[in-house]
Image (cartoon, rainbow, N blue to C red):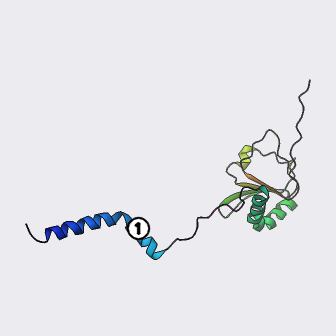
Amino acid sequence: MPSWAPLALTSVTAALLALPVTPALYELWKRGDATPLPTSRHDGRIANFADVLRSRLEPLRPQLERCRSQRELLRTCIDGMDVLLVGCNSQDFDFDPRVIEGIDAVMFSQDALIPAERVVEADVYSDGALPSPKSKAPSE
């Protein structure tokens, strides 16, 4: 038996043991992405969520004003988020599912009222009030 065999066996065993931890050792040495993972800034409080949504939609304000003056709808995109700008009042816009399909946010130029029978899976921003619909008592 050659004298280099135990050395070769030890070397191969050490290499096979080091192979799985090599990426971790390299990351420890280089520290390429040692920053914390991004988390949501609204921390579950609706006021903070609203502030973040408002700041994200702020660049669209000139387009929203143009939609208000022309009383039209405009579908646009900002930072990978599809936004529907609504220039008409909420009585003229009834949240038709075909219109808001694929929309991440709906931005109203004035008060917005979501009909009670509609389910809106997008964030809703209103330049005015966002009242809740009055519940109607069943007729007897």
Q: Taking 97 as reference, is 107 above or below it?
A: below
The location of residue 11, given as percent across then percent down, is 23, 69
The residue sitting at the top extreme is 140
> In percent of the image, x 85 and y 54: which residue is there?
88
> In percent of the image, x 78 and y 59: which residue is there?
50
> In percent of the image, x 78 and y 62: which residue is there?
51
Q: Quadrant of the C terminus?
A: top right
Instruction: Tell me if residue 34 is in the magenta stretch.
Output: yes
Is residue 34 left or right of 43 when viewed as pictured?
Answer: left
* Front-most of residues 86 and 7: 7
> In percent of the image, x 73 and y 44: which residue is there?
97
Predominant SS of the magenta segment: loop
Q: Amino acid at mark 1?
A: Pro
* Front-most of residues 25 and 133: 25
The location of residue 62, given as percent across then percent down, is 81, 67
Res 80 quadrant in image = bottom right
The location of residue 31, given as percent across then percent down, is 49, 74
The residue sitting at the left extreme is 1
The location of residue 127, given as percent across then percent down, is 85, 59
Res 78 quadrant in image = bottom right
Res 17 quadrant in image = bottom left
Is residue 26 left or right of 84 when viewed as pictured?
Answer: left
The residue sitting at the bottom extreme is 30
Residue segment shown in magenta:
33-41
State the SS at label 1: helix
Is residue 21 left or right of 13 when viewed as pictured?
Answer: right
The residue indicated by pointer 1 is: 23
Q: How many marks?
A: 1
* Front-most of residues 129 and 107: 129
Instruction: Tell me if residue 135 is in the magenta stretch.
Output: no
| Label 1, residues with CA under 10 Å away: few <14, some 14-19, many ≥20 | few
Q: Quadrant of the N terminus?
A: bottom left
